[in-house]
Each structure stands twice: as structure tokens, then as C-alpha cells.
Amino acid sequence: MSITNHRAGRHFLQIPGPSNVPDSVLRAMSKAVVDHRGPEFPDLTFDILKQLGPIFGTKASIIIYPSSGTGAWEAALVNTLSPGDKILAFETGWFATLWKNMAEKLGIKVEWVEGDWRRGVDPTIVEDKLLADSEKEIKAVCVVHNETSTGATSRINEIRQAIDNSNHPALFMVDAISSLGCTEYHHDDWAVDVTISGSQKGLMLPPGLGFNVISEKALLASKNASSRLCYWSWQEMIDNNKQGVFPYTPATNLLFGLQEALRLLHNEGLENVYARHARFAQAARIALENWGLENLCSIPEEYSNSLTAALMPEGHDADNLRKIILEKFNMSLGTGLGKMKNKIFRIGHIGDFNELTITGTLGGVEMGLAIAGVPHKIGGVNAAMEFLSNQ
Amino acid sequence: MSITNHRAGRHFLQIPGPSNVPDSVLRAMSKAVVDHRGPEFPDLTFDILKQLGPIFGTKASIIIYPSSGTGAWEAALVNTLSPGDKILAFETGWFATLWKNMAEKLGIKVEWVEGDWRRGVDPTIVEDKLLADSEKEIKAVCVVHNETSTGATSRINEIRQAIDNSNHPALFMVDAISSLGCTEYHHDDWAVDVTISGSQKGLMLPPGLGFNVISEKALLASKNASSRLCYWSWQEMIDNNKQGVFPYTPATNLLFGLQEALRLLHNEGLENVYARHARFAQAARIALENWGLENLCSIPEEYSNSLTAALMPEGHDADNLRKIILEKFNMSLGTGLGKMKNKIFRIGHIGDFNELTITGTLGGVEMGLAIAGVPHKIGGVNAAMEFLSNQ
Amino acid sequence: MSITNHRAGRHFLQIPGPSNVPDSVLRAMSKAVVDHRGPEFPDLTFDILKQLGPIFGTKASIIIYPSSGTGAWEAALVNTLSPGDKILAFETGWFATLWKNMAEKLGIKVEWVEGDWRRGVDPTIVEDKLLADSEKEIKAVCVVHNETSTGATSRINEIRQAIDNSNHPALFMVDAISSLGCTEYHHDDWAVDVTISGSQKGLMLPPGLGFNVISEKALLASKNASSRLCYWSWQEMIDNNKQGVFPYTPATNLLFGLQEALRLLHNEGLENVYARHARFAQAARIALENWGLENLCSIPEEYSNSLTAALMPEGHDADNLRKIILEKFNMSLGTGLGKMKNKIFRIGHIGDFNELTITGTLGGVEMGLAIAGVPHKIGGVNAAMEFLSNQ
Amino acid sequence: MSITNHRAGRHFLQIPGPSNVPDSVLRAMSKAVVDHRGPEFPDLTFDILKQLGPIFGTKASIIIYPSSGTGAWEAALVNTLSPGDKILAFETGWFATLWKNMAEKLGIKVEWVEGDWRRGVDPTIVEDKLLADSEKEIKAVCVVHNETSTGATSRINEIRQAIDNSNHPALFMVDAISSLGCTEYHHDDWAVDVTISGSQKGLMLPPGLGFNVISEKALLASKNASSRLCYWSWQEMIDNNKQGVFPYTPATNLLFGLQEALRLLHNEGLENVYARHARFAQAARIALENWGLENLCSIPEEYSNSLTAALMPEGHDADNLRKIILEKFNMSLGTGLGKMKNKIFRIGHIGDFNELTITGTLGGVEMGLAIAGVPHKIGGVNAAMEFLSNQ
């Protein structure tokens, strides 16, 4: 990408992922490639797996694929399910829909609970649906933890409770792609069977790594699934990882970056990381409210730590606003996806981020609203700053 | 990977891939992540695709996956074939065998031509096998261009001729993972239907990108194949790439590196790149001959530009030699894989490499042979230098 | 500097230099060292000198020292003056005072015009002083263009006019360390004899390079000066630079960075660069005014493009404010130097900087004022944003 | 420096400095600039000073200038001497001559002992000269430890002994620019008064930092010296360094690199670092001898750990050989300086270097000799490898 007209200052990458990557992570990625079969490589693997555990809240097996998050979705499905199996899934937004579409392409039947894209999964519906499934045809309940397209975070622990209440044996699969590293996550405590994630959000890495975390129940299911698979095969990964290696060439330099990103997260302290995300998310919502814009997410308990989606006033084009902000203020915001096209813009406050970056970010939005002639009250940044300075 | 005891000087990564990555490529990879949906991203995509064309020798569609080369193998198979289909494949070495194993896991029947791992695919056998397939059950002929485990390079043009001679409609799939960028490659002229490759060899990148190049015939086949796929789906990639984007998040920073690596290759000139690889490969063989070691590859026309595998004298352990060379001389060499375990060591001369690096590499081998007490004549490096200074 | 507690997000380095360095400049500095006597090196030297010319507004000789700006000060004095010579200098602030002190240490007599640190050099005093010097004892008039300690920018063109009016032969020496690259500068048009600068401000580099630009008159003076010198010798530099080399080992990697920084400045366009600095400086002053804080600089025509110094309300400690802002918001501001100790804080808005960075910067100050309990009106950021969104 | 024709592989920078810089040092240098007056900076300063001590063999004050080594020479002279003072200096080669020339420019009288550029300083002459100086007019004995232009290393301990024998109060100044980090050095034990060094040799950094190490006696002398100085002033540096800061802006990013380079040296172990340099120097001499080329250094006890200079056979042009080697093999060698112009070439084996790099280096020389038609016996590399493999 040749720069034909240099833009001064740092680009504000405030889409809800890929997120801003710390310089030290970028530098770690620029280390010389090493022999992934050499005697020192296992130390890298073991250290990464060890450091990942607390972030996923697990002692279970963690799989790292050279893939996007989409690949990690596919891995979760094909390892555990057979063509013709049924899953229960929920239309919480664009990514939940894409995952559903993928399942169908892979031959899986989907019981699809429609939604208005303004909230997470309703636990009571989960319970009802599972209770209604007297034949136990549903093999898995698939939930997107944080809907990157809407900024609504499903309550995984309550959904778990709903599944338990229904006494249904379905696997529980959770896409934690844009929640991991931003929001507490407890694979083990929530008894999730497959957690899916990616590198380019709260883990503060460029895209290129996909993750699966696998419960014993999921691993058992994988023995009986008939989907044909090779690249995504869990068992080979697990067997190799035990030796600190991978069944095929791993994305070495992304692993170097991952190790450094994990070091940064643990050095800051996971509790601090989550609290920081919560704080900036609240600052964004305060700004939104003060501008008089509506949060797409309609359920306060489900507000996202990772992003905030703002509904545009009727008759105003979100992508025009985003274009103005990009051109005038060198900031990328998230577009409205699917049926939210042009209706919302999304502010990412994810990853490597601090008080002044969120202030600059919200400032860019407020100035953009003014320039684009979008009706709003000024003072959003002011209110956010007041909040931040009282923390 | 914490460095507990710093080793001075640069590590010699002389495995046959991942190869040494030029500093400017590593620096390009350390650029800040960008919005892969932003207005400037398509220029990057288009530039990369344009620069890749001549290296694959094609004007056809090139697919770039966030994956290892193994993923690109899987993509080739699942896009074009249906479970139960038959392919013709050849035991040229470890990687051909792994690819065959993958096909079987994916439900594909393999007509497997056994081999001694000391040569490439015999075109006459291809012709015979296809002529014998009167029912046209064979849907694809799968060949590894350069066997990374043995250092034998199959003659793709002659195999193409053999297929043509047989008048058989099978697709022709070629794994060019460790030949691309080292050896001339002509996807279009050789009428290859699917070319498979990866980033970490002649393209001088870290691992993490897989490639498929697709003929019209292959694309047509993909419409009729019944394998279930999503992540690997060609059509979505092609449709998105036309707009300069990707159906899911691409491995942005590896793409930054790819763009720079392609710039370097074209700046050097592809003919010069191939001649350079041929020159260093010949230098390695001259050293081998002068040491009195045998080249695993038994067919001179099939000697590899990318690596040279040396047979150890009876009773001497290749991995012990490799260990000594790593510890004493900070150089990684390739191990013997599968049935070549301990019987060979492989010298990579691939990627970003020059006269003094090959001299240092061969010097490390010669010194290692002495220390390990492996019977050999001295003078291999001398002879290689004489050759190199006469070029 | 081991990071024992990682702080998320990017540090805001808002001291008035060293300034934030663009990532591509840092990457350029991380290129492998080259032979500074090799055949390709002169291209680098020539390109840098060519690109520097328009920034200094000169076609005269530009000298690049491996030194800090302090070294470049010394070079200007020792090349042109002899011990016992007299110069005319002005107490515009801390750095003017340091330069005066240096001159005295070097055996030069200084006619020192005291000042209140709230404005630049008064051209009428220059004229008066020179007219009064009937013996022409004053060998040089020394002016700091932009006082980094106060944020007042002397009007070089008017001072030039004053010198001309006095018909005095004194050399005109200007310290453009913190103005260069932020404010228009015209070495030739303003008939400056020696311009002094450094790398770490508007040139967007780390510290480590000092500059002298030399008029013919200054060069002639250097032939007659009796200060003893070697490292700082202009003539050897000029002679060597003509061949594209340096009389002693240059700071190679800082030159790599300089070349890239110059590319960025010219790519943005110098007029745009200066306008951008003016815009952000005005935004800072608007914020200041709205907070009800007083600008240290009392002459509006002399407001600085590079920094803004704010006077603290009586009884409030500037360094306590700075400490709070650093700890809470990860932003460095400039301290009050010398007699301004604790009385002011300085906001750098220099170098690689954009609308959202200045917004974040001013936000940090506003939040810091609140936390520190410094009396102020809120709304500074608001007003600055209103200004910025109307540009 | 635009690369118009990419050259594959890594450049071999085998001049005797600047030396090859480890990647991790280059990466450290690409960290974001920090506030050199901020609260965390002193930790950096203190850590660097602490790590430097054992390399200089001292507990005395170490001064770090943003300068080349030439600047550090000047600092040593102007801090301790007054114009008109006399020093005793020795023509060991080009750099000793340059230092002498500098002293004269600075108004210092030099008692100059001529030499043939083929050996270091003769301790008996030192003793004779000092004994003859009954008036004690000689204020300092100036010695270049390792003559970078010739590859002869003076025996500092024996020269110290000679000074002691003469009972002469002269200061002892030693240029350790190209010996430091390659050869044992004992500022304290050898009672050196001023040690001068630079960053770009054994310290494995790019150029841009100069060093002075100062005995109590030198510091005392500095109080009485009348040279006019400011930038180079020791006392200000010492006073500031005690607080972990610098009297003027330090070259921050070179300090980042220095910290990392020191970490690497100590991690390898200084004894190991010196032994490694000795080993590769010996390998170079073995190659030289086997080629039948003469070592410029005629005193075996004075062979250099850092470089080896080879005399060309009569009638053969060293720079032509160097040009061929640069063009064909992408390796820079050192030219003959001053009266050695065209008569010698210099092989640097300094800094970040290992067995395979020295093998490649010597291979490049041997191939170059063949191509250039320089009479020589083949087998130099062979013999060097035999030596290296027996270590």
C-alpha cells in the first residue's frame, strides 16, 4: 500500500477489530523466523499455551490455528458435528448469521432463533428450545459472546444455567472472538465445550491466528463426528502440542507476537485489562448519551466492553459520517453490516487503548457529527472526560 | 522464547523452509495494522495479486488463505473433489505421503504409486496409469513439484505431456510449495489446474499464508464437487478479491510482508532469482560430491533448486550431525523425515541467500562432518567456491 | 528501561521535543548499518541534503553533526568567533540563556539583553543596540527563533530588517531547533548567517543529529576565527559532503531515519505541515483561553507553532499537575525550566501529530486540571474541537 | 538509499567497524522516543552505566556523548589539556595520525614518534621518551589501543609499566575505539587516565555514541586545563549522570540500542566474547597465511582481535579486489588508508559474528582473490575451517 499522500500522526484504528497493536508486539513479530522443529521451539509453544489459559479461564486444551476467526468457527463445527446434525443458533447480528450460514454450508441443520440485532441471546429462549427438543436432536447450542456487529454481549453464564436447567446434553459453543481479552471469560467455570477466538481483537495482534478451546465433552464428541477433516483436526494438534510442536507449520512470527502480547496483558493484570475496557466502554456510552444518539444495544446488562454501536438519526447516512471522519480525522470506525448498513456506526474501544486515545476517538466522532450535519448535542466528549477523570 | 544464552552472529536457518526472511520484509510486517475494509486496502490486494502472477506463471485466479501450506492442500482437494472420488498420487517422499493421507481423511480414494523417495514422478507411469483408467475414474493427478523431504523436483511439463498423451480428463494438481520462487513455474503453460503454495519458502516470508491458483477447468469442477466447505471456498474468495477485499479477515501484516517480498523478487528479476537458486544448488551438490556423500536424489534432471539431501554413510546418525552443527555453528539443517529418519540431512538453499551464505552453510556442514567423525573427504567447500568464483 | 508495569495504549509524548516519531521513521532507523565509505552511501547523503534545503529555505551548505542541538550551538560559535569576540544576545528564556552561558564558557563576551521570558526578541532593541555599537565590536547577533522554554517565536524577518537598518556587519545566528519543520523558515531570504537546528523536534526524529546552515559570509568569517576546533569544523564537512561522505563516521541509522522523515514531510507538503502546526497551536490556545489559563507568551504575533506554555494559577504547582497527568493519563508534558520552574507547564504540539492526537492531548490536560484541583473552566477541549471541526 | 537492484541475502559488513548490529539491537533502537527528563529515564542511564563498567574494566566515571569516536577524542584532549601543552604520540597508523592532527588543531604540541604502520607502540620508546623529558613537559601519552587502519594492538599494560618505570606524571590516554568489546580492557588495572571509545565496533551498535572513561587524575587535570569547552565538559556530564540524566538531550534511541547490546554481551559472557574474537582473528590469520599473503601487523603479540590487514602482492591493487568482492559477493572490506592506500585490504571480524560468518567472509576473500587474479594459494578457508572445527 504505497502512501501517496502522507497523513501526519497516528491512524486511529477504531473499528472493533483488528485493533491497535502495541509497538512491542509488532517488533516481536519482526524477529527472524526460527526452525519450528528445533529444540528451542517447544518453550515458545508451552509458554504461549500457559499464558493463554487464564485469559480463556481454562485448564483445557487450547488449539492455535494459522487461520482467521472464520477458520476457528469451522474447526469447532467440523470437529464435533456430522452432516445432518442440528444446532441451535441465534440471530444476534451479522457474525452470528455468518456462522449460521457456514454451518448450513457444512451440512448442518440450524434451528435459527431470529432476532432484532439489538441484544444478546435470551437465556429463557435457550431453555425453552432445549426443553422442547425432547428427541435431543440439537447437538450444540451456538452463541456469539460479543456480537461485533452490534455491541451486545450475551450472558454466557446465564445461558449455561439455562442449558443446565433444561437438562439437555447439547454441546455449548461460544464465539469469544471479540470478547476475549476485553471481558472476563470462564471457559471452565461456564462449562463451555468449544470456545472460538481470534488474534486480532483483545489479544492485540494482527489477524492470522484462530483459537479453539475444547472441553473433554467436546473432545469426546469429536471422536464420533463424521465430518471429514484434516487441517482442523483437534486430535493431531493436541498430540503435537504436548511435544511443544504443531502438526503443520505454525505461523511462527504471529506466535512471537502472541507471546509478547500475552506478556503485556499479564503484566498489566487481567483484572485491570477488563476494568480498563469496561471504563472506556462506559465513557463511549456516556458520550453517546450526551450526543443524544441511541445505543444499538437495548439491554444495559449486555453492553459490550469491546465496542459501542450508535444508531444514526433517521435520514442520516452512517457511512457518509465514517467517510468524513476517515478523511478529516484519520480514524477508521466500523460500518453497519448487513441489515444495519448505513444505520449504525461502530466505535471500537478494544485492545491497546488508554484514556487519551478514547478521548481522541470520541473527539473525532463528535467533530465528525458536526461536520456531517448529524443532529446531536455537543458535550459528549466533555461528559466522557468528566467520567474518566473521576475514575 | 527467552534467550538465556545469547549466541553471537546470525542464525543460519538452512532448513528447506521456512527460509531466511529479508529484513525489509520483517520490517514491512511490523507496520501498523489497517482496516481491511477501508478504502486503501484494495490497492494492496490488487498489487499483490498482480505481482504474484508472473511467479506462478499465470493470469488465472490466485487465492490467498490465512493458513499454512497444509491448508492450501486441503483447499485444492475439497474445492474440486467429492468424497469417493479417486485421485492418482505418487510416493515421492514425506510430503506427497502426507498429502495422500489428507486426501484419504477427506474421503477421497487414492491410487498410490509407491516410490523409493529418490526421484520425482515418472511421467511414463502417469501416462500408463491414465491410459489404464478406461472408466475415467481418476479425477485428479496430484504431484508434488519439489519434494521438500528429498530434494527431487518432478518434471511438471513432461507430466503434463503424459496426461495429454493419455487423453485423460483428470485435473492436474501441483504442490509448488517449496519450488515457487526458486524454480521456474508455469501454471498456465503447463496447464496445471490447481497450483498449491505457501509463503515460507521461495517467497521469503514467515509461514502463515497458503495459495491456490485455479484454472477455468478447476473452477468448473468446483461447481460440481460435493465436498462441504466454507473457509476454503474459492468462489467467495474470487468474488471478494475482484473488489480488492477478502471474505473474512486476511492476515494483514503477512500481506504487508508479501508485498515487500514480491517487490524484492521482481527487483532482482525472476530469471536472476531462479539462476541464483540453481547456482547455489549446484554449489551444494559439488560440495556433496567432493565430500564423497551421496545425493538422495538419484535423477540428475530432477535435482532440486531449493534443497539438497545428503545420505549419511552407513552407521552414522544424521540427527547427531545436525545437533552438533546446531550447537557448535548455530545452523539449523533439515532432518530426515519418515523413512529417511536419521539417514539423511537436508541443506536448504532457498529464499534470501547469497554466495557467502552458501559458503558459510557448506562450511558449517564440512566442519560438522569433521567433528561428528563422519567419514568424508575435505575439500567440499573449496570445490564449491571454485565453482562459485567461476560464475 | 524494563517495563515492570505495562501501561496500555500509546504514550503521549507531548513535551516540546523530542517529539513523537512516525513508525516508518523508526523502522528506517532499524535498517542494517552500511559502509559509510561504500559506493552507495553518497546517494543517501545527497538525497538528504537536497531534501533538507527547502525546509531550511536555503541553497547554502548544510552541515549534519552526530550531536545534540547543543553541539550545533557550539559549532556555530566556534567556527565563526574568536575568544574575546562580542555577541549580542537576548534573554528570551531558558535556552537563550544556556546558549549565552555556552558562549561565555567558550571565551566570548556577551552583550545580554534581559527579558521577562514572555516574548521573543524585540527588533527595535536589536536596531538600537547595533546602532549604539559604533566600534562594530559586536560580531554576531544570536537569536533563538522559537523559545522551547516559553513558546514565544521571535520574528526573524523583522530582526533581519533591524540589522539591515543599523547597517551593522554582525553575523546573524538563529537557533531554529524547535521551529524547523513547524514554522516557515527562510535561511536565505532572511539572510541568516548561521542557522542551528536538531533532529528531535519538527524533523520527527529521535535526538542525535545537529545542524548548521552556513551563509557565504559566515564561511568567510570562519576563515578568520581563531577558536580552536576540529570536530565542529565546517570546512572539512563541506569538502567531504561534496563527495557524499563525512570527515568522520556519521550516525548512519539516524540518517536513514532522516531520509524517511524528510520524505514524509515533503509528501505531506511543507505548506501543509506548517498549516497543520499552526492549526493545532491555535487549538491549544483556544483550550487554554477557555480553561481561563494564561498563555506565557504575551505577544500574539509571537505565539509558537510548536508548543504552548500555560501559566499556573497562583498557588498551584505545575509539576504536580504534570505528575498527575503522567501517572493517570500516560502523557508527558514539558516542565517549567529555570525561573519558570513550577509556574508553567508546556504542551508540545510538534512533529507527527493530528487532530485526534491534539484532542487527546488537550483532553488529558483538562482532565488533569480537574484531578489536580487547579481552578479552571471546563470546555477547553470543546472549544478546541469546535475550532478544529471548522477547519 | 533507494535500492534499485535488490541483492539477495544479507550484506556482509566486514569492514572493521561499523560492525554488524544484532537484530534485537536494531529493534530496541526502533522503540518510541521517551521523555529524557521523565521519571523512568534514570533507570535506563544507571543500567547502561552499570553494564558498561566491566567492559571498560572500571569503576570510574563513564561519559557518553552523542558524537562519533572523533568527538570522544576531542573531549579527551580539551578536558585535560591547555593550548601549548605537549603530548607524546605514536604513528601507529591512520587513526593515530588523525588524532595527532586533531591535537595540533586544538593548539597542542605533539612529540610524534614515527612508525611503519606495522606494529603498535613500542613500550621501550615510551619509557625512553619520558625519561628524556626531564622538564616534565609532556602532559599526556596518547596511544591507540587497536589501530583500525593496520590491525596492530598496542600492549597497554606494558606501556603503563613503561610510564611507571619512567616515574613521569603524564596522563595516559588510550583510544579503545576498535578494541573495546573485542579484547580485554582494564581501565582501572592499567591505570589509564582517559579511555576513549565509540559505539559502532565491539559494542555492536550503529555509530553515534562516543565514550570517555575518566580517572581521578584526569578529572583533577581537567580542573586546571584552560581549553575552552562546553559540549564536551566532563564535569557537567558527571553531575547530571549522578541523577540519571544528561546535561543536554541524549541520543535516546541509541541508548535503547546500547542497553540491549550490553545485555547481549553480558549474556554471552565477556570472557566468551573476547575468546570468540580471538578465535575468529586467528582463523583469519590462518587463512591469510595459507593464501600466502602477508599480515600487515609484523608483531605476533600485537595481532588484532578486531581486524586483520592483508598486504597485497606487489603490483596488485587492493581496492580493485575490494570492488570485485563487493560487486560479486556483496561484502564490504576495509580499504587501505593513507599511506596504505591500495596496498592492503582489511578484514573486520568484530562484533556480532560467528563461525559461519567468518567462514563466509574468508570464502568471499578467497573467491575474490581468484577472480581478481591475485597470486595466492587456495586452501585458506580450508585451513581456517580445520582450525575452527578443532576449537
Image (cartoon, coloured by chain):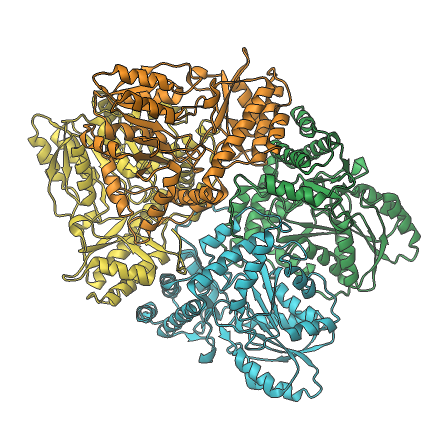
Chain colours: A green, B cyan, C orange, D yellow
Q: Is residue A324 above or below residue C177?
A: below
User: What is the x, y in percent for residue D79?
Assistant: 24, 27
Which of A244/D111 is in front?
A: D111
Tell whether C51 sits left or right of B342.
left
Q: Can residue A42 be seen in this view?
A: no
Q: Residue at x 50, y 75 (%)?
A: B153
Q: Residue at x 74, y 73 (%)?
A: B224
User: What is the x, y in percent for residue D227?
Assistant: 21, 25
Residue C149 position by quadrant: top left
Tell whether A130 sits left or right of B289.
right
Q: Residue at x 55, y 59 (%)?
A: B47
Residue C287 position by quadrant: top right
User: What is the x, y in percent for residue B290?
Assistant: 35, 73
Tell whether B21 sits left or right of D133.
right
Total residue callouts: 0
Residue C112 position by quadrant: top left
Q: In this view, does C136 lie above or below C280?
A: above
User: What is the x, y in percent for residue A32?
Assistant: 48, 53
Which of C267/A204 is in front?
A: C267
Q: Quadrant of the C terminus of chain C?
A: top right
Pick out the residue farthest to the top.
C315
Q: Is residue B88 visible?
A: yes
